[in-house]
Amino acid sequence: MSFSNVKNLIRKDLSLLLHPTAIMFFVLACGMMFIPVYPRIVGFFYVLIAIMNIFTLDVQGRDHEFSGLLPVQKRESVLARVLTVSLYELTLLVLTVPCAFLASRFISNTGLENAAGMRINITLYALVLLGYAVYNIIVIPGAYHKQFKVQFRSFLGMLAFSVVSFGIENLVCRPHGGKLFLNGTSRAELLRQLPILLGALAVFVIVNAIAYFIASRRYENAEI
Amino acid sequence: MSIALETKNLCKTYPGPGGFELKNVGFSVPSGYITGFIGRNGAGKTTTLKVMLGLSPRDSGEVSLFSKSMPEHEAECKQDIGVVFGGFSYHETKRLRAVTRAFKRFYKNWSDEKYCELLRKFELDENKRIKELSAGMKVKYALALALSHDARLLILDEPTSGLDPVSRDEIIDIFREFVESGERSILFSTHITSDLDKCADHIVYIKDGEIAMTGDREQIIGGYRLVQGGRDDMSEGLRAALIGIKETPFGFTGLIRASELYLADGLKTAKADIESIMLYTEKYERHEG
């Protein structure tokens, strides 16, 4: 496995498979943090459309064949794709952090609660990471399946993301349901939420590793 | 003579109705020469190339490039080869500049100087999108990429299909120039046999997934003759010796091995070419019984 090859493959993906709307989705997701009453998960959902565009452009541009002819190993191509997808997801999360800080400050100052869903806190980020992990395990191995049925797999992935994230959000927000600190924004509550974020991050990394192993094995036997 | 590429007993089966099988495909591409890989549509040319390059998994067999086996040394081997499947039809909405920038990072021997020189020579505009190029220009762009990273072997799948005669001739001139130094080679699959008459030194002929003939082009051509005669000129011995026969109400034309030419004594004979060998082996093939 060559680090330089993987790096070049990621750069190739970003230059040839980056759809212009991805930038717009990032901006939208950041902007949505400032809407006082809004289901926060929706903003994070948009990046999944940007990721679907990577796989769609891959099929349209016959990138499997293009990459297959490059002096790289197949598993390097798969690893680069897993990292590109994760890069999209984590970039969005990181970009929204400053917006979240600002939004929490202004929204809490006005005394507004988010009646449409979770408040902006660490649990929200943990929840999104879990949703992304579920999406990746469905979509990434699917993209290296024999028929490369990308659109259908993306649809399934988005559906799974929605079920998982909206489902957990619903549990967190129920008044007598889950532990209330999960939806809190006080310093003490945020500190209690931190291990959940670390746990979600670990799940995200492990699930991506599994997605990589399944996808590489499939890609080795795929007809390109 | 050193060998640039060698395959041994390559097997690949596509099961199911309308399935296809590569049966023990084995041949070699000597360094410094152009090898023509011929066969009719569906004979297994593209499948063989894809299996060789690892784009399609093989059932069994061996492939080695510059004495290094694939896929164990896949990345290393692919540094030394340039591949052109038809024209360049990847990332068609992107500009040449963007595709080249993404492509060149992978090659240790990439030369910007050489690439710019080739763009000028082939009159390619880097600001154009791939889809705006003609079929001939796409082939030239693919060749520019392959030649700029100093490939030692070009593997080309039907590069001249769909091109006008002038463009085909230009491409063939580029091939000749490429192998001139004696260190670089080309494996060139096509069903346009006239292109091979112009430039191929060696021939590999695949028929129904099996290698039917392989060797030096002159030797292959020299090994066969076309025989022509009237209806009464056909003897049982001659009929048995003919590889393929085209019969008309007035007579026949057939392909015979040069070693059996004595059976056609007194009949009109002519030199065979690659096209006639293919035609008489495929279309006018004589079936026993």
Image (cartoon, rainbow, N blue to C red):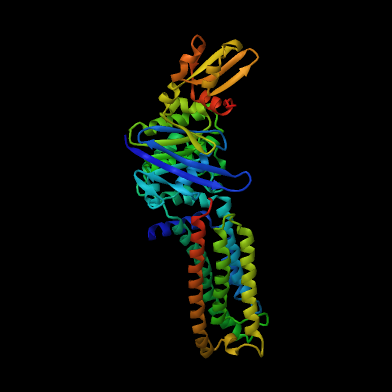
* Residue A45, placed above or below residue A194: above
Of A19 and A218, which appears nearest the observer?
A218
Query: Residue farthest to the left?
Result: B1
Whether residue A52 can be seen here: yes
* Quadrant into which the C terminus of chain B falls: top right
Residue B258 x/y as whole percent: 45, 19
Residue A96 x/y as whole percent: 54, 73
Whether residue A113 can be seen here: no
Would you say A105 lies left or right of A7 here? Answer: right
Q: Total of numbered circles in the picture?
A: 0
Q: Residue drawn 47% across and 41% down?
A: B24
* Quadrant into which the N terminus of chain B falls: top left
Can you tell which quarter of the image residue B135 is in? top right
Of A32 and B287, which appears nearest the observer?
B287
Of B87 and A141, which appears nearest the observer?
A141
Residue B252 x/y as whole percent: 59, 16
